[in-house]
Image (cartoon, rainbow, N blue to C red):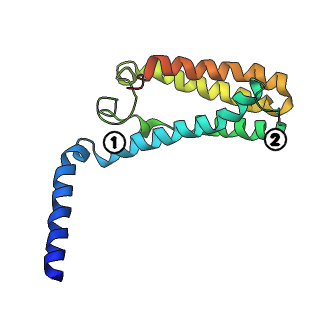
Amino acid sequence: MALKTFTALAVSASLLVTIGTPVLGELSREQQGAISARQAHMTLYGFNLAPLGAMAQGQMPYDAEVAAAAAANLAAVAGLNEDRYWLEGTDSSAGNNRAKAEIWSDPEGFAAEIENIAVTTAALAAVAGNGLDEMRAAFGPVGQSCGSCHESYRAPRN
């Protein structure tokens, strides 16, 4: 009985691997890692933008410590080297992501967007703990930078 159960499980596992392989095999391990890394990167942006946006919009009381920490985190994430995130063949047609092909057809424009987010988040980090007005003034350019990059280089949700 145990041999029959083992055989059934082995056949089932083999079928799952065989059926799943073409889907998983479309991207290399490195490409899959790149997509996962950049999605995690964007998640970190969103996590740290949330309290700053809430404070800027008056949905949350201004807290200098929270603002300074979130802005410092944004600047740190924006300062990471992203070269390995953007591998050829990892646009939205290749997997579960929203990267437009324009990232690779317009590398100079995309590089400028990446540089702009680094500059604007550094400026925000320099003043975020100095009061709501200063934080708001520096937060606007960060949002504009995010929006500009998303408009040009991120596909809409399906």
* Alpha carbon distance from label 1 to label 2: 37 Å
Mark 1: amino acid: Gln
Q: Is residue 50 above or below residue 18?
A: above
Q: Which residue is mark 2?
A: 65
Dot 2, how many residues are within 10 Å of its Cα: few (below 14), some (14-19), or many (20+)? few
Mark 2: amino acid: Glu
User: Residue 60 or 142: which is nearer the viewer?
Assistant: 60
Secondary structure of the residue carrying tag 2 is: helix
Q: Position of residue 12 (x, y in %)?
A: 18, 63
Q: Which residue is mark 1?
A: 31
Tell me which residue sits at (23%, 41%) in the image. 26
Residue 150: tell me if it is visible. yes
User: Residue 25 or 105: which is nearer the viewer?
Assistant: 25
Dot 1, how many residues are within 10 Å of its Cα: few (below 14), some (14-19), or many (20+)? many
Q: Position of residue 25 (x, y in %)?
A: 22, 46
Q: Is residue 57 above or below residue 78?
A: above
Tell me which residue sits at (72%, 29%) in the image. 54
